[in-house]
Image (spheres, rainbow, N blue to C red):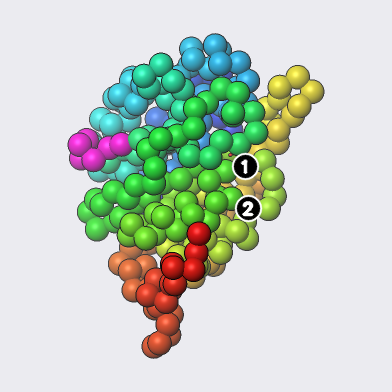
Amino acid sequence: MNLSVIQFESLFNNKVDNTSKILSYINDIDSDILVFPELATSGYYFTDKNQLSKIAEEFDGDTRKIVQKLSTDLGKIIVYGFPEIYEGRIYNSAAIIFPNPELSSVYRKTHLFYKERFVFEEGNTGFNVIDFNGLKLGTMICYDWRFPEAARALSLEGADLIVCPSNLVTGVWQNVMSARALENKVYIAVSHKIGTESDGDDELKFNGESAIYSYNGSYLANASNDKEEVISTEIYPEKTRDKSFNEINDIFKDRRPQYYK
Ligand code: ACM
């Protein structure tokens, strides 16, 4: 099974150009799973809810309809971040699109970062794993990485691969993602953005370095910090399912949850 992560510069408040770029990547990349960054259709740094509401769409909106058709026709799993409007509220969401449309679903970012709190609602989907064609896929978004519970919840549900559409603004996440992969024995794919966006004098720099981690925490592929690029690797989902790492220890069976909060 081939996995690709697309690192690109989504343009602020420009759904037309961002979506057309996403669609051309979907057509061009010959891969089973394609992962795009957080808020890939809209850009990131919204602080005005009214402005954001104009670019937000329902999960079942026009973008999903086009992406769903491509997913079904091409047999690809496609994950992309978008601002979702649902029951009058706006969520920082990821669309998880499977060739089989009834499996397609949405994840709403659980932990909101910085000024996201001014414009988005806290996500209410929880962490879910979807089983398709021998792959158990879990999704979290960006700042969810600071909460080990996110990757652990997905892993306990059986995820082989955790995808993490992101717009990261610090340089401290790389080692943590590697640890999340190792401690849960899962693949992790971080799809990040490049470029800068600002709110007045407050500038955010997105420093790329998108990465795919193996279930032993090592890099399988990683990207530059300043270029649009696609990184790809083969993954073997079934290899994540035996949680032992020697003949005695098993990272799930050895847990002592009665001692954890
Ligand atoms: C982030 O959650 N976009 C840092």
First to last magenta residue range: 99-105
- Give the quarter of the figure containing the N terminus: bottom left
Point 32% across, 60% down: residue: 158
Q: Secondary structure at mark 1?
A: loop
Label 2 element class: loop
Q: How would you rate the neighbour count of disc 2 (Cα within 10 Å): few for under 14, some for 14-19, many for 20 or more?
A: some
Mark 1 CB near ligand 1 (8 Å cut): yes
Q: Is residue 71 left or right of residue 51?
A: left
Q: Amino acid at mark 1?
A: Leu
Q: Are marks 2 and 1 in contact (CB under 8 Å)?
A: yes
Residue nearest the viewer, comparing 249 with 56: 249
* Residue displayed at 56% across by 22% down: 119
In the image: residue 113, left or right of residue 258:
right
User: Where is 59 relative to 253, above or below?
Assistant: above
The residue carrying mark 1 is: 168
| Residue 34 visible in the displayed image | no
- What's the residue type where badge 2 is placed? Trp
